[in-house]
Amino acid sequence: MSTTELAWFKSSYSGSSGDDCLEVATTPATVHVRDSKVEQSPELAVSPASWTSFVSYAARA
C-alpha cells in the first residue's frame, strides 16, 4: 500500500492555527506519522507496538 492510499488523520492535539500538525495513518502492520505542514513531508513508519509505547511514554511526560 502506498502512502498516498493511506487514510491520514490529524491529531486532536494539533493547533487550529495550522501549527503542530501531526497526522497518522494506520494499517494492521504499520503506523505512519508525518507533519502535515510540510509539503512532501518525510514519513516515519513504526510497528503498532512501538507506537503504543511511544504514546504511553509521551502521555506520562
Image (cartoon, rainbow, N blue to C red):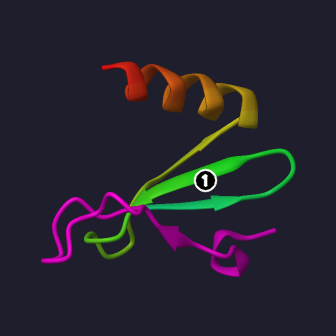
Which residue is located at x 39 percent, y 72 percent?
40
- In this view, the residue farthest toward the front is 60
User: Which quadrant is home to the N terminus?
Assistant: bottom right
Q: Let me know if residue 9 is in the magenta part.
A: yes
Which of these two is toward me, 1 or 24? 24
- Which element carries disc 1, helix, strand or loop? strand
Q: Quadrant of the C terminus?
A: top left
Q: Residue at x 32, y 57 (%)?
A: 13
**Residue drawn at (60%, 53%), measured in percent from left and top?**
32
Name the spot of residue 55 as percent of width and height, x first.
51, 32
Does the magenta run of residues contain 21? yes
Looking at the image, residue 11 sits to the left or right of residue 13; the answer is right
- Horizontal relation, residue 59 to residue 18: left or right: right
**Does residue 18 lie above or below 53 as drawn?**
below
To which residue does mark 1 refer?
A: 32
Type of amino acid at the residue the image marks with label 1: His
**Residue 10: where, in percent of width, then height?**
44, 69
- Residue plotted at (73% across, 37% down): 48
55 is higher (above) or lower (below) than 21: above
Q: Main secondary structure of the magenta part?
A: loop
Q: Which quadrant would residue 45 be assigned to in this image?
A: top right
Provide residue 20's location: percent of width, then percent of height.
Answer: 22, 59
| Observer-nearest of 14 and 6 | 14
Q: Circle 1: is it few (<14), some (14-19), or many (20+) Cα within 10 Å?
A: some
Q: Residue furthest right?
A: 28
Vertical order, 1 against 20 (above or below): below
Report the span colored magenta.
1-22
In the figure, 50 relative to 25: above or below? above
Q: Quadrant of residue 38?
A: bottom left
Q: In front here: 4 or 16?
A: 16
